[in-house]
Amino acid sequence: MRKVLLLLAWNLGVVASAGGREPPAGTGLNAAPLGRVVEVQQVPGVPVDEAAGTFFNFPAHTRLVLNRPGERWKASYTGDQPPAYIALYPVDALLGQFPQRGPNTMYREVVKRLNALRNLQPAEKLARPLPYFPVPNAFQAVSGAARVIRTPTFRGVRYLTIHSQEAGVRFPREAVEYTFQGLTTDGRTLISMHVPYPVAALPSRAALDTAKAWALAPYPGTLDSPEGRAFKKRNADYLADLQRTFDAQDTARQMLALDRALESLRVR
């Protein structure tokens, strides 16, 4: 039965209830390496309301939801994102979301990240933070296991990462995600993949809650003090150790399964 579902997911696009248009024919993914079922959706665009201070909205785009067998994710609100998915954003429409192109706009941030993908360097030379869409309201606390992936139709970088609004805290395994950020070879489509990737070497959220061990150390009154400098060094050492932990996942079975699924992606 699962094989039948996977074949259907490869060949059929399921129209999102709010989309109103069918996804491009031929778009698909072989999700067998992940034990998941693909639902291809056409997601309607949501204009940016700069007057209301909207941080980031999406143009109309195609999304491949990576459901577990027997489950089907449904959005709870406009802009809601699945736990595991691949989004295919038309680059021109993405840039068109941000008409004000001054030096301090979201447009500048989007262009910066697109240019990082257009001028892709070998993985070991990629500057941090690594390119990431959608643009998050958080900083890239750590990234690792970065590898450039190229196929005849697209190229980009895959890596493990954690985004956070906090520093000086321990991160649970549930905060880690596998992501791929890339462009089709014609430069017209941005590919953004997101899948949870719990790293067993990290504590669970429940374990951190039980031990009340979220903080690396008591937060100093000011970072410009001996205590503050010690705090920053402890945090930097922790993040460096996390990166090494992520790097060790580069050829793990779960990582390579995600890579194989990604490389099967067909974009039309």
Image (cartoon, helix red, strand yellow):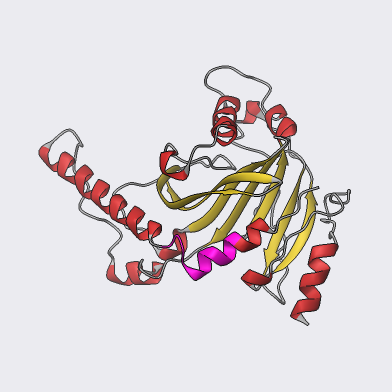
Q: Residue at x 70, y 75 (%)?
A: 69
Q: Which of 76 and 16 lies nearest the eye of the viewer?
A: 16
Residue 6, given in percent of the width and then of the height, sits at 76, 71
**Image location (x, y in percent) of residue 159:** 49, 52
Give how far across and how far down residue 188 sits, in percent. Answer: 73, 35
Rendered view: 243 above or below 6: above
Q: Nearer the viewer, residue 171 or 89?
A: 89
In this view, the residue farthest toward the left is 226
Quadrant housing residue 28? bottom right
Q: Quadrant of residue 45?
A: top right
Q: Considering the image in quadrants, where does the N terminus appear?
A: bottom right
- Residue extent of the magenta highlight: 249-259
From the viewer's perspective, tell me whether residue 196 is left or right of residue 212: right
Q: Seen from this angle, which residue lies furthest front?
A: 152
The question of residue 256 being in magenta is answered with yes
Q: Is residue 22 left or right of residue 137?
A: right
Q: Is residue 14 above or below residue 23?
A: below
| In this rendering, position of residue 235 left or right of residue 248 | left
What's the magenta bit mostly, secondary-structure-wise?
A: helix
Q: Is residue 223 magenta-colored?
A: no
Farthest residue, direction top: 102
> Which of the 4 quarters of the picture holds residue 256?
bottom right
